[in-house]
Image (tube, grey):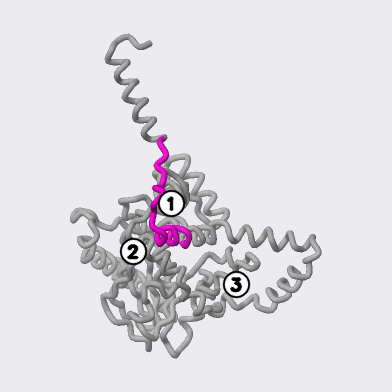
Amino acid sequence: MLTSAADFQTVSVLLKKTKTKMKVDFAPLDVPLHRRVQTAAVLQWVFSFLGLAPLCISLFIYLLFTRFWLVSVLYATWWYIDFDTPARGGRRVPFLCGLRVWKHMRDYFPIKLVKTADLDPKHNYILGFHPHGVLVAGAFTNFCTYATGFQKLFPGLTTYLLMLPLWFRAPFFRDYAMCAGLIPSDKESASYPLRQKRGGNAVVIAVGGAPEALDAHPGTFNMLLANKKGFIKMAMEHGAHLVPVFSFGENEVYDQVENPRGTWLRWIQEHLQRIMGISLPLFHARGIFQYSFGLLPYRRPITTVVGRPIKVEKKQKPTPEELDALHQLYMDKLSELFEEHKGNFGVDKDTHLNFV
């Protein structure tokens, strides 16, 4: 029971706070057209990331039971013939990578690419991208499109962003993904560009992978890297130089339901990730016509800083000691890159990377 005026006052304050949280903040009607276009560009990207693959699978099955069944049959034939293409470097379409829609997406956040050193196109590289974030917006915009000028900053290099092999089993969607230079993240597919002796190939790996997306909370710098040595071994086997890449702001564009390690929600997410191969962060940000809730990312800047290359000598069978030494060197160089640039992006001087 409410027994005093103080109790009534407390309840009143709580009700006011609840109403404030429930209030929907609608976008004004006079939003400039170019910002509407930017929102539309990001909307199509979010849809392609979250909903296009299931839609393509449904369409493929649906057509089999209509008078257009031949479309699915012909595509299935093409799929069989073309099955190994993703594992052989994919099929990038430069025209699509250069479409203006990606510049609108770049300007929405905005996203910038910063170069700290030259990368000699005579060599092959593995670019370790950190952090994964929720939807790896920085990695896609910088390395799958021409919007931020990677080709001008690093002439002679061709990038290949790794993506879960699961998505290359979706009809139609696999072709869409390959158009942007995406290839499967299995070892055989990732090794193919690195085996090319002419050089000029850069394989981009979001090292933390899907599990790291579960830690993509604003203001956090947890890197799932302490036990990630597969990409280090691959670099040594092919003599590919390692390049640490840190994307400031990557974790800031989405909020996520709190899921600390040890909670029931985190337990469910981690088990589903092991079973399905994909993580399911409960993320949210803003909508199309309002700023209170939805799956569109916030308009917050992302700046991706490409670090200096770490020279790697080719060794077909590196010893555990050699592997550990290069792994530690990579973590040290990533930390140095973060420490060198964090002050430019509002990160507190006492904040450091946390390797887990």
In the figure, is residue 283 to the left or right of 344?
right
Q: CA distance from mark 3 to mark 1?
A: 28 Å
Count every numbered label the image shows and give the total: 3
In the figure, is residue 331 to the left or right of 191?
left
- Relative image position of residue 75 (x, y in whole percent): 71, 72
- Can residue 26 be found in the magenta stretch? yes
Asked if residue 259 shows in the view, the reply is no
In the figure, is residue 333 to the left or right of 91?
left
Q: Residue furthest right?
A: 67
Q: CA distance from mark 2 to mark 3?
A: 27 Å
Circle 2 residue: 247
Q: Residue at x 29, y 72 (%)?
A: 114
Marks 3 and 1, the one that precedes in the sequence: 3
The label on residue 175 is 3
Q: Residue at x 40, y 36 (%)?
A: 23
User: Where the N terminus falls, by quadrant?
Assistant: top left
Task: Please state which of the two labelled residues, at mark 2 or mark 1, is closer to the viewer.
Answer: 2
Q: CA distance from mark 2 to mark 1?
A: 17 Å
Residue closer to the observer: 81 or 94: 94
Marks 2 and 3, the one that precedes in the sequence: 3
Q: Residue at x 44, y 75 (%)?
A: 203
Above/below status of 7 relative to 63: above
- Relative image position of residue 54 (x, y in whole percent): 62, 58
Read off the magenta span. 23-41
